[in-house]
Amino acid sequence: MKNKSLEIEKTIEELILSNPHLASALHFLGIHFLHHTDDTLKEICDKKKISYSSLESNIEKNLTVKDNYLPVNALSIDLIIAYLKHSHYLFIKQRLPFIIDVVKKFEGDYPQIKGELKIVFPLFVEDFVSHIYEEEDTLFNYIMLLNNALNDNSTLHKVQAKMMENSIKQFQTDHEVHDDHLKGLRNLTNEFEILSSYDISTKVVLSELKKLDEDLRYHAKIENDILFPKALSLERQVLATIQSKIALN
């Protein structure tokens, strides 16, 4: 729907079947697609007492909001961490709440998908959110401590104690265990394949899970290919600085 006017006389079901991501855009406007499948956008405007141009503008805005795929490799390590933290925020505060709600209210015609989703997805969310907070509290904090120590030698004594307990290599090894968060759901749904025969609820769920999976893979790639190599180099620089200070004493 990007760069095109929404068709005001089409029903929500018709619009979402052609673009399942419209469901999340409507959700952020307080409109749950399952409650309005037979309504047209014009009817929703009348019910919500909002102008069509305002509704269209907000929908387009939500449909076009995507992760900013910045040239992350060119960023300093503190900005990379800021970027990753912002991605965490988007996952937890925007992406997951909608998918959780859709899974909870899932009315698809496919019992196996419905049954497994209601069991597997809550477990995924619990593990994923726990992993994010742990990553920020341990890995990110450790990297920032290293970065600060390199820029301010007066904090070397603090980082030296932390280096006795932590290492980027160990964080990297532990991180690999959590790399493929959605593997189980991907296998269950045959790579989130969306068949033409699927009902609207199933198409929306699989579409959102597929997009989430793509974003998580991109997120993991930044951490594995950019953050960890930079962090390893930073750790070596800090260690060399500490050793040189010891040699001078």
Image (cartoon, rainbow, N blue to C red):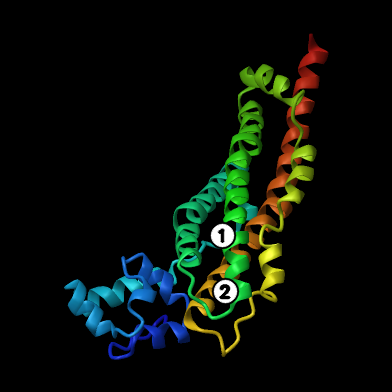
Residue lying at 39% horizontally and 70% vertically, measured from the top left: 25
Which label was assigned to residue 54? Answer: none
Viewer-proximal residue among 115 and 248: 115
Q: Nearest to the eye among marks 1 and 2: give it.
A: 2
Question: Looking at the image, is 129 positioned above or below residue 240?
Answer: below
Viewer-proximal residue among 243 and 81: 81
Q: Secondary structure at mark 2?
A: helix
Residue bearing the label numbered 1: 70
Viewer-proximal residue among 82 and 25: 25
Question: Which badge, 1 or 2, is on the more N-terminal residue?
Answer: 1
Viewer-proximal residue among 205 and 8: 205
Q: Are marks 1 and 2 in contact (CB under 8 Å)?
A: no
Q: Amino acid at mark 2?
A: Leu
Residue 122 percent location from the top left of the image:
57, 56
Q: Position of 236 compared to 220: left or right?
A: right
Q: Secondary structure at mark 1?
A: loop
Residue lying at 62% horizontally and 55% vertically, measured from the top left: 124
Residue 248 percent location from the top left of the image:
79, 12
Residue lying at 66% horizontally and 74% vertically, measured from the top left: 189
Q: Is residue 76 visible?
A: no
Residue bearing the label numbered 2: 206
Question: Looking at the image, is 98 positioned above or below residue 88?
Answer: below
Task: Find residue 16 and report its image quarter.
Answer: bottom left
Residue 80 percent location from the top left of the image:
59, 48
Q: Amino acid at mark 1?
A: Leu
In the displayed image of the protein, which residue is found farthest to the right? 247
Q: Quadrant of the C terminus?
A: top right
Question: Looking at the image, is 61 positioned above or below residue 143?
Answer: below
Residue 24 percent location from the top left of the image:
42, 69
Q: Quadrant of the N terminus?
A: bottom left
In the displayed image of the protein, which residue is found farthest to the top? 249
Q: Position of 45 compared to 240: left or right?
A: left
